[in-house]
Amino acid sequence: MKGPVEELASSIGAAAVLADPAAMEPYRRDRALDPAAGMPLAVVLPRSTADVQAIMRWASARGVPVTPRGAGTGLSGGATAVEGGIVLSTERMRAIRVDEATRMAVVQPGLLNSEVKAAAAERGLWYPPDPASFDICTIGGNAATNAGGLCCVKYGVTTDYVLGAEVVLADGRAVRVGGPRLKDVAGLSMLKLFVGSEGTLGVITELTLRLLPAPPLARTVVGWFDSTEKAAAAGLEIASRVRPSMLEYMDRTSIGAVEDVLGMGLHRHAAALVVARSDDRHPDGAEVAAMLSAFTEHGAFDAFEAAGPEEGERFAHARRIAIPAVEKLGPLLLEDVGVPLPRLPELVEGVEEIARKRDVVIAFIAHAGDGNTHPLIVYRPEDAELTERAYLAYGEIMDLAIRLGGTITGEHGVGRLKRPWLADQIGEDLLEVSHRVKRALDPDGILNPGTIFAMPAGAALGEEARAR
Amino acid sequence: MKGPVEELASSIGAAAVLADPAAMEPYRRDRALDPAAGMPLAVVLPRSTADVQAIMRWASARGVPVTPRGAGTGLSGGATAVEGGIVLSTERMRAIRVDEATRMAVVQPGLLNSEVKAAAAERGLWYPPDPASFDICTIGGNAATNAGGLCCVKYGVTTDYVLGAEVVLADGRAVRVGGPRLKDVAGLSMLKLFVGSEGTLGVITELTLRLLPAPPLARTVVGWFDSTEKAAAAGLEIASRVRPSMLEYMDRTSIGAVEDVLGMGLHRHAAALVVARSDDRHPDGAEVAAMLSAFTEHGAFDAFEAAGPEEGERFAHARRIAIPAVEKLGPLLLEDVGVPLPRLPELVEGVEEIARKRDVVIAFIAHAGDGNTHPLIVYRPEDAELTERAYLAYGEIMDLAIRLGGTITGEHGVGRLKRPWLADQIGEDLLEVSHRVKRALDPDGILNPGTIFAMPAGAALGEEARAR
């Protein structure tokens, strides 16, 4: 008699199933490292839509939970294995086809964001969305979380580039939503509902992406400030006066942490650094001049244009590595709160207040142009008392963002970590309606249980729902 | 004892309820002029979200259908009154607030698109989406249909500019989805689901819209062709070589009809006219030069840049009035099919073939840059035999678009007219799943019954479902 793993393997091909605990270990968690992750029954590595359909048919027939997974770079616990469930990794689904004439790419979900960018660039085209993790995160994960990045302030987020998708539903049916068309309003916009649903409504097996022509070379402008208030005000001024293609903010703690890694001569004593970019096609440099004068008017103690693309890229790189750099100070609770842009100074100030009150180190980096910020709370798991204070600060930052009319997550997703705060932001009514949509698409609750929506109690789940 | 209309009126204020058949007549249909429109019980004209909530509470308690309505400029019958139901017109909900610092507008749904554009322009800002009917259609209707327009080829469609909304659900609860934030991934993207749902999932009572800085002055380039094939090929070339901010196509019939109205000296003997625009911020004119050379290479018999913005606007205006101009030839069956751009020449040819086979006049205008086209079938309702052939052609054009990998509706919506073809395009599985989402949000089916989804049979509806 076959066991469940053999039965699963025989329906999708043995090579694609891992069931050894050691082999499965790297697939149990994303970068949120949720300690409550379960040990799955199996990790499956499909290569095709048909494979994914077979897996979902098998799982739905047995009520077995399925956790879809890209590269596991998620920061909210959205790819956390369920005890006795299946982890479905898209890593072997890596086909891509780029069409220059229509500026579109058709990709399988397991390709890295940077590989999509590279394939587009080979044809003189550009896929804009650029999470800082773009060289390690998958395009499928980007779509599942509606990922953001640095260019969003001018170029929008992932959903703005998704024209179509193929999605395998909980019951194993595959549907095509949208397609290679810039305009299509035939029926409900199920496409945009799947984008950002964090694997709770279906498994994305193919994406049709809109590409843009390659952008003009960008010019990078840097402003150094001795107060976070001045820096935040300068950022707001730039965002409202011109149209930066990047507008990033780092505070003293993150500047120091990055300088420790890169040794590029950053001003360690500065309170804040703002890095802005202009890719305006007009060659008169008016946008760069406006950025420089906004820095000066708001009291930058140093403001200059990077000498060229290489120097500009060094500052962008400094910002991109800020999270791993700060991680060297200790494990992080990684925030992703956003506020309407005019409230950004209040958020900066409020987070400083929380850090003082809870006596924790909070590094502060931000996509200053769109109000999406990443307060990084440093803690030590072996120090229970500090860990407690860090978690309190984590929640208080979300409470603050909600009070300021903001969001608990701008680009990382709700996952498991932020679920307890979701109702506070969107309200019980909208959460209830969202839950109805979830049940409409996944009546047995087998798709990524515990993410966005509370873990259902039930025999199919090897583990009790856990209130964090 | 109060009748139902008095009861309704007393709950939302008497001034806002029309119940006289003559007063209600203009609210029974949109521009699709559906002959099956019912006589509603009442037309209600709410001013506030609270009014809309009261109406929906009243209606849901009684199972009375509600047809939400903007200005009634829809072309697919999405605002067709149901016998014994309520028509909810948003025409008195007209507040707007523009914020320059964040480049956002918060608007009630009854404002015209052109009024939103004007309010933005007063602050030096721009709301891009521009359906040709922009000076008579409402922003709420635009969001409900995810309306397109001429600038979409470069600037995207309505959903790309909707950051947030307030929506009153079928049961009268009001929920806020999204908000004044460029990035927000907290929970399922219910916002994007409501956009384009044609009033079947909720009533939009407020929108938060993203604005852009005012665009640079555009330059307009015109190409005249003696064959539709050459014109379509030139359009495809321009769309793939540069990034036009407008790329429009008109055939001989529509050129003649517009010339009859405007007398601006259009070439009546031409087979097709292509109007392209560049708003590239680079002043070197390379984009304009590329457009001109694409016209010449593809055999335009005349190609030139408009002498200035005024002349350029005359050509854009000529394209915008094409539908009313062709309407002077007779009532129209108005198509809205779209295809992937490389299939555009096949669509043009296929529609010509259908016109010959069915012996009907079909004028052809298109947003050539995004593959969205409007074949306009001229008929005479008093000629039953011609009308029959016109309807056959209408269906055959949708069948053709589907065969070419396209859509039955690029920007007008499914409404009632296109419902019979929806499953052919999106498939029975996706339609079934969409229906589950509909039922999750509107279990009693009172919101805009007959639009997108088949009219439910049931006592609450004064009229049987009608298979068109």
Image (cartoon, coloured by chain):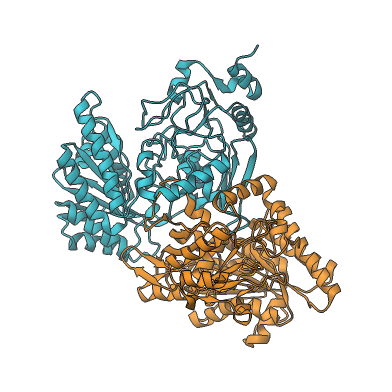
Chain colours: A cyan, B orange
* Relative to A99, A133 lies left or right: left
Specify whether residue A211 is in view: yes
Residue B351 vertical position relative to residue A141 in the rendered view, above or below = below
Residue A355 or residue B311, whichever sits in front: A355
Residue A197 or residue B358, whichever sits in front: A197
The residue at the point 64 percent across, 39 percent down is A174
Query: In which image quadrant can residue A335 be found?
Result: top left
* Relative to A351, A60 lies left or right: right
The residue at the point 50 percent across, 67 percent down is B140
The residue at the point 62 percent across, 86 percent down is B264
Residue A402 or residue A212, whichever sits in front: A402
Image coords of residue A298 (percent x, y)? 18, 60
The residue at the point 59 percent across, 73 percent down is B73
| Residue at the front extreme of this rendering | B1
* Relative to B421, A429 lies left or right: left
* Relative to B32, A302 lies left or right: left
Image coords of residue A91 (percent x, y)? 52, 31
Image coords of residue B92 (percent x, y)? 47, 75
Specify whether residue B356 is in view: no
| Residue at the bottom extreme of this rendering | B263
Image coords of residue A160 (percent x, y)? 48, 53
Quadrant (top left, top right, bottom left, bottom right) of the C terminus of chain A = top left
Quadrant (top left, top right, bottom left, bottom right) of the N terminus of chain A = top right
Query: In which image quadrant can residue A96 be found?
Result: top right
